[in-house]
Amino acid sequence: MSRLRSVAGSTLLLVVACAPADAPVSLEALSPVPSRPINVVPAPQVVESADGGFRFSAATRVAVVPEFAAVTRQQLGMLRDATGYSLEVDPEQGRIAVRLDVGLPAEGYRLQISSGALQIDAADEAGVFYAFQTISQMLPRAEAGSSDFDGWSVPAGRIEDWPRFPYRGMHLDVGRHFFDVAFVKRYIDTMARFKFNQFHWHLTEDQGWRVEIDAYPRLTSVGAWRSETTVDKNVDPYIGDGVPHGGYYTKDEIREIVAYAAERFVTVIPEIEMPGHATAAIAAYPELGCTGAALEVSTNWGVHDTIFCPSEATFDFIEAVLAEVVELFPSEYIHIGADEVPKRQWRESELAQQIIQREGLADEDELQSWFIRRVEVMLAAHGRRLVGWDEILEGGLAPDATVMSWRGTEGGIAAAQQGHDVIMTPVEHADFDFYQGDPATEPLAMSWAGFGIDLATVYAFEPVPDVLTDDEAVHILGPQANVWTEYIKTADYVEYMAYPRAIALSEVAWSARGARDYDGFLARLRAIQPLLDELELNYRPLDH
């Protein structure tokens, strides 16, 4: 635990709100707690250890200020499930106290723990939520009743903690393979336990459209379903599996997921791909393409030539779709994709060439920039901001766009130097569809010339390039990992590919830059493995 500061043998004096007068403390609560190390991931900013710890008992009560009553009651359910104790809320007295401290950073918290009291201070509800996630990790995981179990307790000490970055993201592609509502909720739950706060939901693709749109019902009746899927990596020559695949989320299901995420302080950012990765939409409405030809939802992977034509009919479509999307998703950002856009159809389109000439554009790259600027105006009319993959830099960046830099960090550097906000998600560190070990012993995954991403590679990622000045660096909002699902067909496989790599990224996103230590991280990760098992998370076993 070289990442953490320890104060060996120190005594921590805590202010106790009030001892519960109506429930005497049991002998169990007063019995000494053996000292244990504080093992938390992501690593807190400050940790001071002390001897002993706080023991929960049937007599334990919780005092909470009104501002934090709702989130505290929600999170006490987690502790009740673990300990079996009622942990009743008493507004005025309790050995556990949850208090307001406006001097703490946003999303930050302070934990002060002794044998007599457990005190949580936070400036906002998110800070209280994250304090409880930390407490959950510190609980013993030995089976109750076993010889190793010494009751429900947490180690004594002080933790003062806040995130390094305001944006801490995980992505899930449901366009290639569809995952049901229950799993999406589980995915969000696990993210929140490790203090991620942004869920990037990739909802549309060449292989499937997954969001219900009233104005265009064929997007789901046609675009959400494909006849089959290419077998493994047999793209050329093509071999199909003969099994239809599809699904979509109703508006009520989306509202349910968005509300569920908000309760866990996770913002859901929808991605509606344009102008490329649009085969499913154009299969439903051929007039949106440049050729007008009928086609089917793609059953194959790769970059497709089929893209939206920059016609007024297309912009009417986009405006109607986005009007319904922003009604479903209250997020500040709406992601419009804009990656991997081949321009052949625009080069061959009389309409596209007329627009280039009319608008005085240099080429098809500038036509894409013109396209994206029009979409940005639509989103701004709804009070939202546009975010897109780093290809939106091509032909000139829209005035207020935020760049998600995936083709390395160069796009993010260029955007930050131009004064644009950036989310760093470079493929070499953050694409969790890539192999994380020897392909001979791993399930099918993505690879480029043998390239893979193991746990150490994720942990080594630094979101703020040294080349940026301090003024430019403030535009780096934070990192994100992406789970693309071409070869990831099941929920268990999603978890296997995401974890424990996502836990490594959580420390990159939350903890201080200069204090990260991979060996210390591995030690703490091993210490919380029983929690992963308790959650029945299908994580990849550690190599070490």
Image (cartoon, rainbow, N blue to C red):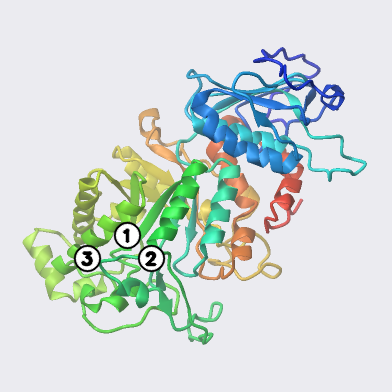
For disc 2, the marked residue is 204
Query: Earlier along the polypeptide chain: callout 3 or callout 1?
Result: 3
Q: Is residue 459 visible?
A: no
Q: Nearer the viewer, residue 217 or 520?
A: 217
Query: Earlier along the polypeptide chain: callout 2 or callout 1?
Result: 2
Identified at 39% across, 31% down, the residue is: 469
Q: Is residue 307 above or below residue 163?
A: below
- What is the C-alpha distance between the residues marked 3 and 2? 15 Å
- What is the C-alpha distance between the residues marked 2 and 1? 12 Å
Q: Quadrant of the N terminus?
A: top right
- Image coordinates of residue 126 in percent, x first then y, are 51, 34
For disc 1, the marked residue is 338
Q: Is residue 123 above or below residue 451?
A: above
Q: Residues within 10 Å of mark 3 (few under 14, many from 20)?
A: some
Identified at 58% across, 33% down, the residue is: 72
Mark 1 belongs to which amino acid? Ala
Mark 2 belongs to which amino acid? Thr
Mark 3 belongs to which amino acid? Phe
Q: Residues within 10 Å of mark 1 (few under 14, many from 20)?
A: many
- What is the C-alpha distance between the residues marked 3 and 1? 16 Å
Quadrant of res 384: top left
Could you tell me which secondary element the residue under label 1 belongs to? Answer: loop
